[in-house]
Amino acid sequence: MIGAGFDAVLVAAQAGDELPSAPDSKALAAFLVRRREADPERFADLSLTVIRLLGSGEYVVDPPGADPPGHFGLAVRDYTHSTAPNRRYPDLITQRLVKAALARHRCPYEIDELERLALHCTRQEDAANKVERQVRKAATALVLSPRVGERFDAIVTGASAKGTWVRVSAPPIEGKLVQGERGLDVGDRLRVRLESVDVDRGFIDFVRSS
């Protein structure tokens, strides 16, 4: 899998650091090491913010003779990943390709077939992750239901047209900021109040507080 592109320049600037404008995994790794040494107490929040900015990955095909996209997070160009084929179908595909190459046999897949399989595997993995997230959100909303009205310190982990999301460190939970989100960006810190929860839908809603 390859990591999606992202822009962490603003997050670095807010931390008093600097990152190049073009995605650079080595520069990002060095930045995270510096921040962990400089502010270990807040490093967990920062690293989570960066992970959120990285976004989800996707399976892609690297045909012979092409320039491989590589893996952003690992900072390598030539990359594949395989575990037990009974765990993930992409691993079964990878093992079939490796086995054919070692035996000097013809590739068991055509390029267009591999591209369709890669897209299918990405979609299926995204669907599975969506279900897992929903279950976790519902469980978290249930646990938080007695704490509606309480105030917490939070950090903005996502800000887009779809909404603004904040993470509370104690307890470590994430929810949507449904009021007072204007002007906020990823990495901003603020006080929030737990406004409501919806266990069935897994909704955890916060409002900005003083």
Image (tube, rainbow, N blue to C red):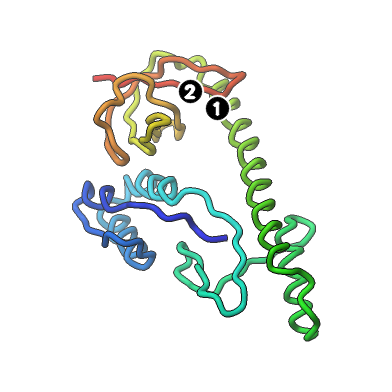
| Residue drawn at point x = 78 percent, y = 86 percent | 104
Which residue is farthest left?
16
Inter-mark Cα distance, 1 to 2: 8 Å
**Amino acid on which the number 1 mark rests in the picture:** Thr
Quadrant (top left, top right, bottom left, bottom right) of the C terminus: top left
Q: Earlier in the sequence, mark 1 or mark 2?
A: 1
Mark 2: give few (<14), some (14-19) or many (20+) Cα within 10 Å. many
Which quadrant of the figure has residue 99? Answer: bottom right
Q: Which mark is residue 204?
A: 2
Numbered disc in front, either 1 or 2: 2
Q: Residue 15, relative to residue 199: is it above or below?
A: below
Q: Position of residue 201 (x, y in %)?
A: 59, 21
Q: Secondary structure at mark 2?
A: strand
Q: Position of residue 157 (x, y in %)?
A: 38, 38
| Residue drawn at point x = 23 percent, y = 49 percent | 15
- The answer to the question of whether label 1 and label 2 lie on touching residues, with beta carbons closer than 8 A, is yes
**Amino acid on which the number 2 mark rests in the picture:** Ile
Q: Secondary structure at mark 1?
A: helix
Q: Residue 187, relative to residue 112: is it above or below?
A: above
| Residue drawn at point x = 46 percent, y = 15 percent | 196
Q: Which residue is mark 1?
A: 140
Is 170 situated left or right of 199 in this image?
A: left
Q: Position of residue 52 (x, y in %)?
A: 43, 45
